[in-house]
Amino acid sequence: MLFAVIDTNVLVSYFLSKDSSPPVVVVEEIFGGRITPLYNDYLFIEYRDVLGREKFGIGQSEIQTVMDGLQRFGIKVESDETGITLPDVKDVPIFEIAFSTRDCDSYLVTGNTKHFPRVDFVVTPKQMVELLDRT
């Protein structure tokens, strides 16, 4: 089992993809028990805000189903402030969840790795699938 903070863009890609793309596999592996999502209140608020945007056309019941699953299969954590500065200030709390849970070898899964420091625990959905294949 792997622990991971799932960036919002991965969930958007999950909803907008119709195939077995890496974001779809990542979310399916959460429901399959191979990935344990790590989250906090900030991240859940962001999920709801972004996924609920009209431009994505995602139904509220679909969003609720995924949110319920993330909560049921995930672990709510409190993160420590790192003092890190990132290009998008909204990414700081997401990075801090992963940074604060490194003791359990957690990852931050994002489609926008360039928004985060170049560290080994910030991975793309494809890299997360590759990690799963090795476990």
Image (cartoon, rainbow, N blue to C red):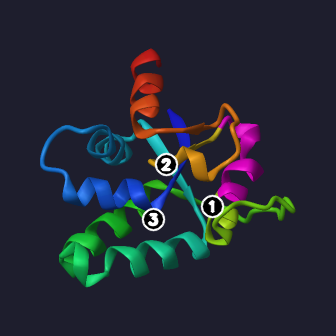
Residue 86 percent across, percent down from the top left: 72, 60
Report the span colored magenta: 95-105
**Does label 3 or label 2 sit earlier along the sequence?**
3
The image quadrant that residue 81 belongs to is bottom right
**Dot 3: element:** helix
Residue 40 percent across, percent down from the top left: 61, 68
- Asked whether disc 1 touches disc 2, contact meaning CB atoms under 8 Å apart, the reply is yes
- Give the labeled residue for mark 1: 94
Please give left or right for residue 35 compared with residue 57 in the image.
right
**Does label 1 or label 2 sit earlier along the sequence?**
1
- Give the labeled residue for mark 3: 71
Report, in whole angstroms, how far the alpha carbon at label 1 lies from the one at label 2: 10 Å
- Asked whether disc 3 touches disc 2, contact meaning CB atoms under 8 Å apart, the reply is no
Is 100 covered by the magenta stretch?
yes
Residue type at mark 3: give it. Gln
Please give left or right for residue 63 compared with residue 75 in the image.
left
Q: Residues within 10 Å of mark 3 (few under 14, many from 20)?
A: some
Please tell me whether the stretch drawn in magenta is mainly helix, strand or loop: helix
- Please report the residue visible at 45 percent of the width from the left and 65 percent of the height from the top: 71
- Give the labeled residue for mark 2: 110
Compared to residue 100, the image places residue 49 above or below, namely below
Please give left or right for residue 55 compared with residue 92 in the image.
left
Residue type at mark 1: give it. Ile
**Does label 1 or label 3 sit earlier along the sequence?**
3
> Which disc is residue 40 wearing?
none
* Front-lying residue, 135 or 72: 135
What residue occupies the far top of the structure in this picture?
Answer: 134
The image quadrant that residue 38 belongs to is bottom right
Report, in whole angstroms, how far the alpha carbon at label 3 lies from the one at label 2: 19 Å
